[in-house]
Amino acid sequence: MIKLVNVTKSFNDFKALDDFTLSIEKGSAYGLLGSNGAGKSTLLRLLSGVYRQDGGYVTIGGESVYDNVKLKSRVFFVSDDTSQYNRMTLKGMADFCKTFYTGFSQEKLEKLNSAIGLPMDKELSKFSKGMKRQAVFICALACSTEYLLLDEAFDGLDPTMRLIVKKMLINEMADSGVTVVMSSHALNEIEDFCDTVGLVHKGKLIYSRELDSVKGDIHKVQTCVGDGFDSQALGLDILKETVLGSVSTLIIKGDADEIHRRFIDGGAAFCDIIPLSLEEIFIYEMEGQGYDSSKID
Amino acid sequence: MTAAKLTEARVKKSFFADYYFYKLRSCKVSFILSIIFSVLCIPVAVLLQIVEVNEMKAAAMRAAAEQTPSFFLMNTFEPVCVSVIIISAIVLFVNIFTACAKLFSYNTSKSDADMYLSLPLTSTQRFMADFSAGATILALPTVIFTLIGSVILWLCNINLTVADLDVLKSIGEFGVMSEVDYSFASSRAYLFETVSTTAFIGITLIIMLLGAYLVSLLLFNCCGRTGDAIVYSIMLEAAIPLLFGIMLSKCYAVNGISNTACYSFTAIAPFGTLISAGQIFLFRLSTQSMNDLFVIYDFATVAAIIVIFAGLFFLSFAAAKHRKAEKAGVHFVFGMLYHVISLCFITGIIMAFTESDISVIIIVCLFCATGYFFMELAVGRKLRQAALSVLRFVSVIAFAVVFQVLAHTTKGYGVNHDIPSANDIVSARNRSSYGYFYDLMPYDNIELDDREEIELLLELQKKLIGNEFGVNNNSTEGMEVIFGYTLKNGNYQRWSYMISNDNTELINEITSYGERIVTSENIREEISQALTDPEYLVLIDGNRLGIPVYRDGRTLFGDRLKAETAPKLLQALQNEYFSDDNTGKLYAEILIPGLPGSYSYPDSYRLRIREGCDEVISLLSDESNYCATEEELIELTVDSTPLIELGIVGPPDDSDWLTLYLSQDNYDSKEMDKLRSMLKLVDPFELGLYENSINMYDNTITGVLESDYEEFFGILRNVCPIIDYSSDEY
């Protein structure tokens, strides 16, 4: 299990993580959501041992991560920036990984590469952004580590390649039970892949829950109500309400059945509950944190 | 198999070696460059020496066969080789920065930090592996080639022999060789202990490379940008020797600069090593002495080098341990180091000019202030922090001024008085250089190992230190007087003083000391010879010369030893004085007559008798050996017959030029005037003598005798017995 307890990390005066506490179950696929500068990358760098926390504890399997050789050999970190591999070829990267990750399998790498067809002897500096990420990604999988940390996992990948990568990850999880922690702004990919998500904002964890729970807890409601209907009087946790004529669209947190019952009981002509995508949930949640687009006309 | 099981199955305790070899592979370009330019540096130096030794041997053989030797090959080969060596050394130093930039890229690039810092290594393992890889890349090739070169030269025994040197010297003296070639050959001859020269070059280069590498190591672990690390590495390498050197020179500058201070630069690699190594080479070439090149690597200096290197290493290690990965990209992770480097550099520059005119000082301060302002901007200082910057800069100026004032008022904090005592000195060497006073220094570059000579030299230096003659340190023209002492602990100390050309009082004083030292030096040799020559004893006895003995500035037991005591005393002197028994406290001083016929030396020698000379002291302390009465003394003085030595120095086919060397001053003055009037005085330069050399010796009369030979020699015989200069006969 990955655990962060009361972790703080500051960069000069800026608090990237502030009293941050999080647990991630072993074998899970965890998605980190959050605004830019929320602290997601910092979190992943703390987990990979690149950064050392200023306060609190960062442990994997009960052991502190920083300077822990045994533990770090079980973790592979794919950074959001892949320029460090520019001077390597895919073959060179394989040699690099082979040197430091005892679980590395050349056979596995070749098998994974057969699906995407990257040249083995070409320098990565000559690759496109997406190709670089693919190269790093298959090397990471070939290392067969217990923990895979992916920062901006799908950045630069085309839709087909996203699909391939997701399949590779799912197969890896199924085969070896790897724990994947990823951050991405491609929320639909996280929605497709992750079983648990955490929302981070301004260095604090807003929540960390199973994806189904998140999706089951917030709903878009379309209803038709007459004059004098006051949705606030229903006693629901309404995040947003838009009225267009007699049709109201609301974003409400809570149980779907309860919401439906209250609207009907309250005199609504109808009440449709529409499931929200993760992206919509993210936007509405962030609006609740004062992070929204309403400031721009 | 699950990932956990797979990892568990192949778990490794340490990836240190894997990482080390990976870094070696990743820096293969730097490694190859290091090997190539080490080959061009050390083996080329070896090759140069082999070629030059062979050329010198061939030249010696040609000269022995009375052919004119030439050094055509050396004249063309040497500059090429030296250029290759210098360029190679520069490339090796530049290579340090490229290697460090690659090895410690995770300190300057965030993406590299993500890659390297997430590897299964502790920060200690990572630092040690990177440090080792850097040392391997940058120093190992030079170490290997130095060893190989030295061993090859040692096995092949490629050296100039003493016989070769003698031939070369002799052909130079007899003018077989051109002056230029002779100068070339004789100077290079002193670098042809090929094994030690190669080892010295190699070791010096290794120390310099390691020093530069350790400075870069520190800066690459303290900076977040490659540019800053390189710029401030160079500045640190320059700043500390600059500041250290100037502060030391201020301490010694009241009257001179000690070479001890310069050798101390060795401890501050790499520039310090370069300065010291250059100095020892130049010293060897200029003095043409086979002094030990490794004198700069004495125990204290090596210890200092080790301490400084260890200090740089541990500072780098501490920086690596404490720096945070997120600092990649910032100018300085530890701001204190920036302040130390920049302020040391500026302090050094300002201190170098504190003795200049006020206008120069102001210009230098303005220049430094501008530089400092740009440095502050470059490392991201904000304008609101300007007050602090100004305060730092003002502090630097204040420090420079206070240091200068204190150095002056305390005579270099007393350091310039810290010359060694005679007890600690094995031998001394004195040298003057440049300027037309050169010929006034007859004791130039003589190795002095007699305690009296050493004490005389120290006495002269103390007078210079006391600034009794108004030595002007700022004088750049004139005569440089150098004092060098080889100490019992193996160290060599050297002091130099610049004497302005118009300081005639000092020049006369130095000349006087020169004569005394030369006298002291030559007395040993001449009296040693004389004491084995029965004629000398006869001469002493025959002339009944009494020997005065002084103690505590006064004569002992009256005035002089009886004439019959002289042979006993001379025998005792031979037994003890010249057998290294003359040690301990001073007992007395005696004046014994000089060798008649010895050119340019005083007519008596002052010997200091110390308590180690038992036999001599027993003679001196026996009152019965002295002239007991005034009559005896008068008789002795009256009977002392003056000698005149006659020298014929002119060309035989011309009128004879006569030189009379007068051994005493009690001649009949009227008769002497007659003799002078008969000689036509000639311009001394016609005799091939410098005017000064004649003026120096009042007991010399030189002139041309054109007629009246019989009358002249008749008068001369009345004055004294005559010794023929050429035959030493009466």
Image (cartoon, helix red, strand yellow):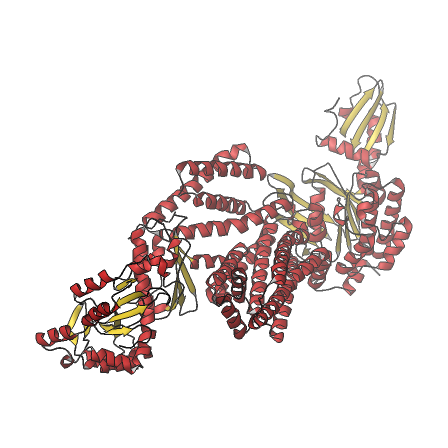
Question: Where is residue B115 shown, x and y percent of the image?
Answer: 72, 51
Q: Which residue sits at x=77%, y=31%?
A: A284
Which sits in the foreground, A41 or B31? B31
Which sits in the foreground, B67 or B46? B67
Which sits in the foreground, B107 or B682? B682
**On the image, which quarter does residue B592 sit in?**
bottom left
For the N terminus of chain B, give its image quadrant: bottom right
Which sits in the foreground, A294 or B676? B676
Above or below, B458 against B324 in this view is below
Judge left or right: residue B414 versus residue B243: left
Question: Where is residue A186 shown, x and y percent of the image?
Answer: 81, 39
Question: Where is residue B64 shown, x and y percent of the image?
Answer: 56, 72
Residue A192 in view (yes/no) = yes
Question: Where is residue A47 shown, x and y percent of the image?
Answer: 70, 50
Q: Which residue sits at x=80%, y=37%?
A: A217
Above or below, A183 against A294 in this view is below
Above or below, B514 against A43 in this view is below
Total number of numbered discs in the rendering: 0
Q: Which residue sits at x=70%, y=38%?
A: A38
Judge left or right: residue B275 versus residue A177: left
Residue B557 in view (yes/no) = no
For the C terminus of chain B, give its image quadrant: bottom left
